[in-house]
Image (cartoon, rainbow, N blue to C red):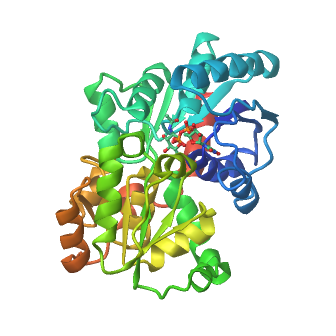
Amino acid sequence: MRVVTVVGARPQFVKASVVSRALRVRHEEVLVHTGQHYDATMSDLFFRELDLPQPDRHLGVGSGSHGEQTGRMLAAVERTLLETKPDLVLVYGDTNSTLAGALAAAKLGVSVAHVEAGCRSHEPTMAEEINRVVTDHVAALLFCPTPSAVENLAREGITRGVSHTGDVMLDLCRERLPEAERRSSVLTTLGVDAGRYLVATIHRAGNTDDRARLTALVAAFGRLDTRVIFPVHPRTRAALAGMPLPANVCPIEPLGYLDMLVLVRRARMVLTDSGGVQKEAFFVGTPCLTLRDRTEWPETVEAGWNRIVDVDGDAIAAAVATWTPSGAPSSDIFGDGRAAEKIVTLLAEAW
Ligand code: UD1
């Protein structure tokens, strides 16, 4: 079986690393990087650290408006598919690269397989929600990380080709956490002690491109009596230009996977608008505050380890001061750590 995998953004390098390895045991993979993320800290670092093979094709699409970026990718992925003639195209998550890969394949009559299918924020205008919904509706194979993702698809009338596989991010986290703890010196480098700092990330357009929300978040961080380690996404860095940060907020360059995992694992709490970071916090047992008014990962909230606080400074301050979840989080909701193997088996069966 020849599979073309289309990736382009940081979370996709993370997810593809485990599936790609399992896939290449018996099958041929052509790895296509759209170039949506191109900074060394957003791309190269992940390929190196996660042993993801170098891309066979780099489309070099770069930044742009949504239509422009997705359109350039669509044309370039289509050319690649015509040249490589795959049996199947594999896409991940909810980015513009996901949508472009899925559409290019579907229009050529090539089957699309979607990893992380069925996730929904139920926010129809959100860029990622549009990408997810369209991708799921053209996909032949839909690999769902959670039971709620399967239910979301059923509500949209999609039941054929749907499998509950578990989450490939859990596979990677379980596999790499021991090594990360051994190798990473991120706490020493940053001069923080375990349990005595917070980690914050912001990159969603809904927060970065809305000045009032971004200002509210920065002010909320400034009210906390703890150091806030803040790995800054390039989009957020641009949006923050000219906005002073409070003294307790420590902005740093985006981290690699292993350092980020350790930083999250040892933090007192995580504050984030990222879906992936919400899950990673849950996997390693760190309480999480979600800086949005909803989440694609309701299981983490139901389990009592994630709270939706949006940009509410009072809610954020109160949670940081007083909230400690009870019991240990059970990551079984996200599978058994063998999602990648299941996905490869299902791909081969469908072929
Ligand atoms: C994208 C995804 C989002 C995912 C996130 C992970 C879409 C619609 N959004 O958001 O689902 O959670 O990636 O990070 O696909 N930039 C750089 N260097 C880079 C990459 C981006 O400077 O390496 C800057 C560019 O100015 C760009 C902006 O960041 O315009 C936004 O990048 P883009 O890829 O459009 O979306 P993300 O915000 O990263």
Q: Quadrant of the C terminus?
A: top right
Residue occupying the point 52% across, 33% down: 114
Residue occupying the point 50% across, 39% down: 93
Residue occupying the point 50% across, 85% down: 192
Question: Which quarter of the rendered image does ligand 1 occupy?
Answer: top right
Q: Quadrant of residue 319?
A: bottom left
On the image, the x and y values in percent for residue 334 come to 40, 56
Q: Quadrant of residue 68?
A: top right
Asked whether, in this view, residue 216 is left or right of residue 284, the answer is: left
Residue occupying the point 42% across, 45% down: 208
Q: How many marks?
A: 0
On the image, the x and y values in percent for residue 331 come to 38, 64
Work out whether residue 264 can be spotted. Answer: yes
Front residue of 27/260: it is 260
Work out whether residue 324 can be spotted. Answer: no
Front residue of 60/136: it is 60
Q: Quadrant of the N terminus?
A: top right
On the image, the x and y values in percent for residue 231 come to 53, 63
Q: Is residue 87 above or below residue 314?
A: above
On the image, the x and y values in percent for residue 126 come to 36, 32
Front residue of 230/345: it is 230
